[in-house]
Amino acid sequence: MNKLKKHFKNNLPIYAVLIACIAILCVAIFVTHEEEVPKVDTSRFEVVTLKETLEMFEDPSPKLLIIGLNTCTATINYVPYLQYAQIENGFKTYYLELDDITGDQIDDYNKLVEKLDFEYNFMGETDQFGKFIGSTPMTVIIKNKKQVFGYIGSMNTSSLASITKLHGVATKEE
């Protein structure tokens, strides 16, 4: 027993470091870190439902619709450009969150895909714009009850100003 006490006394720093390492390892493995995931800032947008989006195709006046995903980094980074452009050029931005679409809305979702019939080339594939839903952010201009413009990805403020003026979405004159 004395040999054991002497051994522990002589090697106490080694055992202390070993126990500390095991404790740190256990904390690292078993404690989960809930990281705050940034979300799209829709404070300056009118967030619309899928049903409201379909109703936009019944109105002849021009509208700018953004289709995005709440946690999509590209969409999050695009928002400041949209907000600046809408303030500078006087237009309203409508925002459809894809994560809010539920399984029981499949018929309305399919109707939206059909209405997004603007021919578009995305990553070397040419098809109707609606076929690329899920690639975000999507910028859509609806005018005269149909899609007249579509773009997947971010645009700078001058491009946004140009397309919104061209299609009559922007209300401010220079």
Image (cartoon, rainbow, N blue to C red):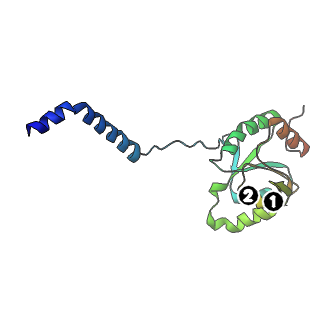
Relative vertical location of residue 98 with respect to residue 45 in this rendering, above or below? below
Figure quadrant of the N terminus? top left
Observer-side mark, 2 or 1, equals 2
User: In the figure, is residue 157 to the left or right of 23?
Assistant: right
Residue furthest toward the front? 3
Look at 88% across and 55% down and name the residue there: 144
Image quarter of the C terminus: top right
Element assignment for label 1: loop
Q: Which residue is mark 1?
A: 116
Q: Determine crowd level at label 1: few under 14, some 14-19, many 20+ residues with C-alpha closer than 10 A.
A: many
The kind of residue on which mark 1 rests is: Leu
Image-based side of 121 in relation to 71, left or right? right
Q: Which residue is label 2 attached to?
A: 133
Find residue 72 and report its horizontal and vertical position in percent: 65, 47
Decide: marks 2, 1 in contact (CB < 8 A)?
yes
In this view, 22 is above or below 113: above
